[in-house]
Image (tube, rainbow, N blue to C red):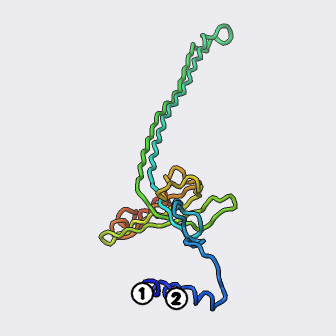
Amino acid sequence: MLKKIFAVMLMAAFILPVISSGNVEARSLWRDNQWGMYADRKARNVGDILTIVIDESTTQSATKARSNSKEGNVSLGAGTGIFHFLAAAAASGSDSFTANGSASDTNSVSGRITVTVIEVLPNDNMIVEGTQSIWQNRDEHKITVRGIVRRDDVTRNNTIPSTKVADATLKFDGKGPLNAKQRQGILTQIFNFLF
């Protein structure tokens, strides 16, 4: 009997406030702006974040070879008759040019940087941008990434390879004592500008 009274009181505690307010509405367990139970947590709106996995490598090589040569010979026999005073003469000339050159360049960059969606385009592509700044011994190393990402290319871990970022711009910059020593001095820059 005591259990029945307790059950009735418990039901009354939940039902009476709803009846007295006159508003009875069904509510979902999930908020509309939240992720569903089985949905992947991928970036899709302005302000969402995702991680770009940077794995870029470029190799560039060029080899050039050029050669050019020219040769000419002229000979005149001795004069006869009234031109007997002309002696036999000969002339020859040659010109040659050869140039060889080669250049090679290899770059490799790897890392991870988390960026923010700053705009969603009409075709659902997202413009992302982010900056990572690392300070070490009063030197700052800054990486800035900007580009366009397709929602379909974002993995279920909310990451995307840098090779799938369109119009990607990766900027590496730094400042501090070590970085300052790696730049040319002002006198050297002026000398290079003038000459």
Q: Nearer the viewer, residue 58 or 175?
A: 58
Residue positioned most to the top: 81
**Dot 2 amino acid type:** Ala
Q: Which residue is mark 2?
A: 13
Picture quadrant of residue 88: top right
Residue 128 x, y percent position in the rendering: 56, 63
175 relative to 92 in the view: left or right: left
User: Between disc 1 and disc 2, whose residue precedes?
Assistant: 1
Foreground: disc 1 or disc 2:
1
- The answer to which of 114 and 194 lies nearer the viewer is 114
Which residue is painted at 45% across and 42% down in the image? Answer: 59
Closer to us: 82 or 79: 79
Between residue 165 and residue 29, name the one nearer to us: 29
Instruction: Measuring from the top left, give residue 3's x and y in whole percent.
Output: 43, 83
Q: Residue 136 vs residue 66: left or right?
A: left
Query: Hey, which residue is sitting farthest bottom in the picture?
Result: 20
Q: What amino acid is labelled 1 in the image?
A: Leu
Residue that appears at 40% across and 62% down: 184
In three-dimensional space, the C-alpha distance between marks 1 and 2, rounded to whole angstroms, equals 17 Å
In this picture, is 24 found above or below 45? below
Q: Is residue 59 above or below residue 90?
A: below
Which residue in the protein does label 1 denote? Answer: 2
